[in-house]
Each structure stands twice: as C-alpha cells, then as structure tokens.
Amino acid sequence: MPKARYENIYKDLKQKIEANVFTYQELLPSENTLIQTYSCSRNTLRRAVSRLVTDGYVQTMQGKGVRNIYQPIAQAAFTIGEIESFRESAARNGHHPLTEVLLFTEFAVSEKQSLYTGFPAGTDIYYIQRLHYLDDMPLILNHNYFLKEAVPGLTKEIAENSIYQYLENTLHMTIVNSKRIMTVEKMTEIDEKHLMMNAQDYNCMAVVTSHTYNSDGVMFEYTQSRHRPDYFRFYENAVRKPT
C-alpha cells in the first residue's frame, strides 16, 4: 500500500472538509463512491479515513458511514499530535500569517546553552529570533536553534518564509518527531516589547519548548516558542481506548 497514495487521499479529503465542501455533521460520500473517485483500493481509502479519524476530522459510524465532525477554531491553535509549521497552522485556521526575523546569526553552543538545547557544547548552530503575526497581530516570539550541518544554506529570507518548507522541499529532509514541553513562565522585557503586551495586564507567557528530530535520528532543531496567553491554544483530538 503506497504511503503517497493514502497520504494524497487524506490531504484531499482534509482540504475539502476544511473548505466546507462537506459541511459539519454531513456524511461523506459512501465508501464505494470514494473508491471510484480516487481510483484506489478499499484498504487505501480506509487508511486515509482512519487518519482523518485520528485527527478529529471525521467519525465512522457502523452501518451509517463517515460523518464530518470538524469545526474551525476561532483563535490561533496548534495541534499537539502533529508537527506543523506556523504557516500551515495559520492556513488550517483561516488566518493570514506574517513572519518577521528579528535576529539571524551563527555561533557555537556554549556549555550553558548545551544544558537546555540538547546540542553538544561547541556545536555550530543558526540562532534565529522570529516574530509571528496572525492577521497583523504579533502572537508568538520564537527562539530557534538549528543544527548548521543539518540545514546548510539557511538564510534570513528562508526564515521569513518557511524553514520547514525549505527543509522538506529543498533539502529533502524527513521530519519525524518532536518532543514538547509546555510551561507557564514569567514575561520578559523582550516578550513585552515585541508582543505588545502590558505588564499590568499580563505577567506570564505560555511557552512551548521542543526538540525535533529527522529520519536519521538527528536532533536538528531546538525551539522555544513564547505565546501571548490570551491567544494561546493547543488542540488535540483525544480518543478513549476500550479497557
């Protein structure tokens, strides 16, 4: 069962659900109809639908079909179970994204930086500060550390667009998994300055720290994302497993 085949079907159905081609609570076309539409096997279609179920887009009902249960999220939201770029998240939620690079530099990781980034001391990295806007409002301040040898040719211009698109489409890197920790931390002067927050109204930030790995098992990225608390939301579709 070629992965690309079910992936393409999954992405097409997902896009149609998000675009409201299939409205909320509507049943998708029958399994036989979809098999004919995509000229695929039953197993391939079911694998694509299974992923939509896992992502919280549809629900399968015995003897009735597959129902669309997707509802757009009003505020900015990122998924817990998937790795998606800022632009991908913005598109999924119907927002207009903009990224401003505040700082782009290179240096060798110090002993102190090694303790929290996970990169060995002396490792050459790109360090990038990026401010992410949604609909012209600054919402996320990112501190990105990228392993230089894993992402050759990274530039400020690429960082303003999409680093992940560059990694996957130009460098042909396969991004596999990301270990995340979510915390609430005290707001800094840098947060207050760039995210346009009043310290009298907010004194804390929602912070997501991630260590991300490629298909070679190499940790190529350490990132600390600092979110405005009034717009922060992480989304997950939780499924109860039979006991």
Image: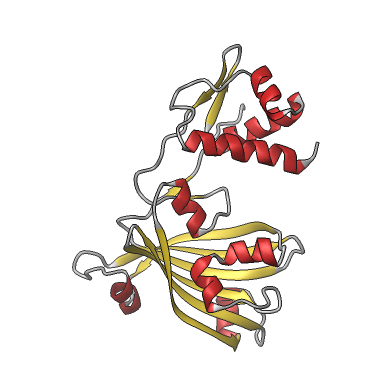
Quarter of the image for residue 41 reads top right
Q: Please state which of residues 14 and 146 is positioned toward the viewer in this rendering.
A: 14
Q: Residue 172: x, y in percent?
A: 72, 63
Q: Which residue is the extreme one toward the left?
A: 200
Q: Residue 62: x, y in percent?
A: 60, 15
Q: Residue 19: x, y in percent?
A: 46, 37
Give the image's coloring scheme. secondary structure
Q: Which residue is the extreme one toward the top?
A: 63
Q: Is residue 118 visible?
A: yes
On screen, 189 above or below 175?
below
Q: Identify the residue at image location x=56%, y=75%.
A: 145
On screen, 158 above or below 105?
above
Q: Identify the residue at image location x=44%, y=27%.
A: 23
On screen, 226 above or below 28?
below
Locate the N terminus by quadrant.
top right
Locate the C terminus by quadrant.
top right
Quarter of the image for residue 153 reads bottom right
Q: Identify the residue at image location x=55%, y=34%.
A: 239
User: Is residue 130 shown left or right of residue 152?
Assistant: left
Q: Identify the residue at image location x=55%, y=31%.
A: 240
Quarter of the image for residue 38 reads top right
Count of numbered labels shown in the rendering: 0
Q: Is residue 238 visible?
A: no
Q: Please state which of residues 79 and 99 is positioned toward the viewer in this rendering.
A: 99
User: Is residue 60 shown left or right of residue 200?
Assistant: right
Q: Residue 205: x, y in percent?
A: 35, 65
